Image (spheres, grey):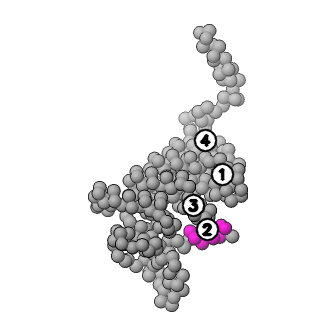
Amino acid sequence: MRKARCLVFCCLWPFALSSGCAQFWDDVTSRDFTVGSLFTRGPAPLQVLKDSDDGTQRARALASLQEPLQHGGTETDEQVYIEILTRSAKSDREPLCRLAAIKALGRFKDPRAAEALRDVTEQNLTYTADLNNIIRQEALKSLAQTGSPLAVQQLVRVAKEPPSAGAALDKQEVLDRRLTAIRGLGMYNYPESTETLLYILEHERDTALRVRAHESLKSATGKDLPANPQVWAQALHPEQGGTREGEGLASSPSKVWDVLTWPIRLISGN
């Protein structure tokens, strides 16, 4: 039931941004309703954000903001938009406004957008557990879309989170975040990304995480290989014969002996 509520919310909140939460169901059940009416343009977004206290109108305005420097704007415009979206993403009282700002920040290439989204993923949110989980997942998705090196670092960190030792709800929330982060890493063909995905594929006990890591490896590299860690190690490290740095030590007696006797040989000069 909890997952069903989350799914319904995730599917419908983009439409709610365009029509208003309280009024949304009245709109869609009206005889005069058309899909196009969800996307009708209203007052200028900045004017709405300046003058309106209506959460749904503000959410609609936030969702419509585009990065000025990508659309002929100025550095001053960029600064204003980043400040507005960061403030809403991190501290707006309306969850719909937070989600709208988070979504908009994902379209920005400014490094400050990635920093704001990273901060949201680490916030101690105070909504319901379901809604907190949705906000963090949306922040991770938007963070992945920024293309920022900071995004890779944060996605790797979340993907490597240990399983929760708490209640079933806590365990599911951690799993959801990790799955979202692993999917995000599939957008980056960087060593930090692919090595993390390979490690999860090889060592993670949870089947869903391994399956997601395999899908992301294929997305990141463009290679359609089976879910075999050794095959992927060979593909990612052909010059090493599929052996990553630090591997093979335990299986090589001579290397083990070298490591164990290194302090003695250093002192004796041998």
Horizontal relation, residue 4 to residue 223: left or right: right
- The C terminus lies in which quarter of the figure? top right
The disc, 4 or 2, on the residue closer to the chain's N-terminal end is 2
Q: Is residue 7 shown in magenta? A: yes
Q: Is residue 100 above or below residue 146?
A: below
Classify residue 261 by image quadrant. top right
Circle 1/circle 3 CB separation < 8 Å: no
The N terminus is located in which quarter? bottom right
- Which badge, 1 or 2, comes first in the chain's sequence? 2
Disc 4: CA contacts within 10 A as few (<14), some (14-19) or many (>=20): many
Q: Nearer the viewer, residue 194 or 171?
A: 171
Pointer 1 or 4: first along the chain: 1
Q: Are marks 1 and 2 in contact (CB under 8 Å)?
A: no
Disc on the earlier residue, 1 or 3: 3
Q: Position of residue 189 (x, y in %)?
A: 50, 48
Residue position marked by numbered label 2 in the rendering: 6
- Mark 3–mark 2 CB contact (< 8 Å): no
Q: Residue at x 65, y 53 (%)?
A: 209
User: Which is nearer the N-term, disc 3 or disc 4?
Assistant: 3
* 267 lies above or below 167: above
Q: Nearer the viewer, mark 1 or mark 2?
A: 2
Give how far apart the Cα atoms at labels 1 and 2 are: 23 Å
Q: Position of residue 118 (x, y in %)?
A: 49, 52
Q: Which residue is mark 3?
A: 126
Q: For this view, does 194 lie left or right of residue 249?
A: left
* Numbered mark located on residue 210 in the image: 1
Left or right: residue 97 versus residue 156 is left
The range drawn in magenta is 2-10
